[in-house]
């Protein structure tokens, strides 16, 4: 088993980079700007933490409730829009936003919440209903296909298919380093719901398709897991009510980063990719680690 202290830089401490935010989500590192951008939900904006300037600025305003985001294989921003009920590409330079997918089988998606891009370029995203259910996270609306699923969208063919249908409220998701396992959070025990979901499930993937059997991997006892990330060695780093918890691929917990407030999402960044940024309620935090995201090597 990995020694957890080996995954953090010696003497590493949680740093408060910014506070006074409303509800932070969806961090992603933009290497060419040396900045980590993230959603501030209730101000309906995207903020940017600049490492060279050590300062926070407004990256974009009036964004129609963006939530989770990632980079595609070209390094462009792919993000979830609660307000527009779809997955969109945002040009970091011009600010231009292009809707990629907002329908399935002729009806609207609910409110895509988190997104990852597989090594073949396909976009996998969760579609819970927080953006149409919760005030201040989007616009009121109906669940038009009557459920909440995880979808795979192939931009080359424009095909969209449900891939996970056995999670009540799918939220964060991440692939193992070789894309052979998909991890998905169920957060149905939150947002006014009393569902059973405060756990992460694992799904084997064969030839880009789900093998259809999921398994319970771990549970977070003090809050629902929201965002998760997988490091280069395959450990799963999960948001929790008191920080971040780290697990072996078999679901064994190996350590915790403790914060005074709930962490909802996390992402690696910084020059060397070893800084872990944490969206923590009204704060934006970081800690230095010795590892990085499993997808870091894709970035030029
Ligand atoms: Mg989320």
Image (spheres, rainbow, N blue to C red):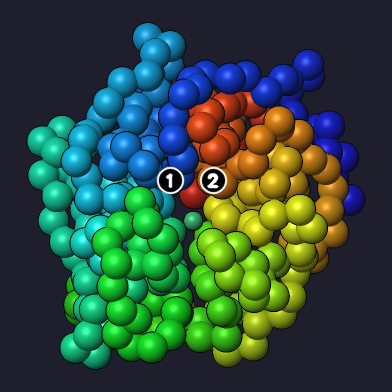
Residue sitting farthest toward the top: 53
Say left or right for 102 vs 67. left
Which residue is depicted at the point 16% across and 61% down?
99
Q: Looking at the image, do the residues carrying marks 2 and 1 touch, with CB atoms under 8 Å apart?
A: yes
Q: Which percent across, then down, holds residue 147?
A: 43, 85
Say left or right for 91 vs 43. left
Q: Place residue 289 in its image quadrant.
A: top right
Viewer-nearest residue: 82 or 211: 82
Residue 132 appears in view? yes
Q: Is mark 2 within 8 Å of ligand 1?
A: yes
Which residue is depicted at the point 22% across and 50% down?
64
Which residue is depicted at the point 22% across and 34% down?
60
- Point out which mark residue 265 bears: 2
Cα distance between the residues tagged 2 and 1: 6 Å
Viewer-nearest residue: 158 or 63: 63
**Label 2: element kind:** strand
Residue 117 appears in view? no
Say left or right for 221 vs 160. right
| Residue at mark 1 | 26
Q: Which percent across, then down, holds residue 21?
A: 44, 29
Viewer-nearest residue: 265 or 271: 265
Label 1: few (<14), some (14–19) or many (≥20) C-alpha neighbours in 10 Å: many
**Label 1: element kind:** strand
Q: Earlier in the sequence, mark 2 or mark 1?
A: 1
Q: Is mark 1 within 8 Å of ligand 1?
A: yes
């Amino acid at each position: 088993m990995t020694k957890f202290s080996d995954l953090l830089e010696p003497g590493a401490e949680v740093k408060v980079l910014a506070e006074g935010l409303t509800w932070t989500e969806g961090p992603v590192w933009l290497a060419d700007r040396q900045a980590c951008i993230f959603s501030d939900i209730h101000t309906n904006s995207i903020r940017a933490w600049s490492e060279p300037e050590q300062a926070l600025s407004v990256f974009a305003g009036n964004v129609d409730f963006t939530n989770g985001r990632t980079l595609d294989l070209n390094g462009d921003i792919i993000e979830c829009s609660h307000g527009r009920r779809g997955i969109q590409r945002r040009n970091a330079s011009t600010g231009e936003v292009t809707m990629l997918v907002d329908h399935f089988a002729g009806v609207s998606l609910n409110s895509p919440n988190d997104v990852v891009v597989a090594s073949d370029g396909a976009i996998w995203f969760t579609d819970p209903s927080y953006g149409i259910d919760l005030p201040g996270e989007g616009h009121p609306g109906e669940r038009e296909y009557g459920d909440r699923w995880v979808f795979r969208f192939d931009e080359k063919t424009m095909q969209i298919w449900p891939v996970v249908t056995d999670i009540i409220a799918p939220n964060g998701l991440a692939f193992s380093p070789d894309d052979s396992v998909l991890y998905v959070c169920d957060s149905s025990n939150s947002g006014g719901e009393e569902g059973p979901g405060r756990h992460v499930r694992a799904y084997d993937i064969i030839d880009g398709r789900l093998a259809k059997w999921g398994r319970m991997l771990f549970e977070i006892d003090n809050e629902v897991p929201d965002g998760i990330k997988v490091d280069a060695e395959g450990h799963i780093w999960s948001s929790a009510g008191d920080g971040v918890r780290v697990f072996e691929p078999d679901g064994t917990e190996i350590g915790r980063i403790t914060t005074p407030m709930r962490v909802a999402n996390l992402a690696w960044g910084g020059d060397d990719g070893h800084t872990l940024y944490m969206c923590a309620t009204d704060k934006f935090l970081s800690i230095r680690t010795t590892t990085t995201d499993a997808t870091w090597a894709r970035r030029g």
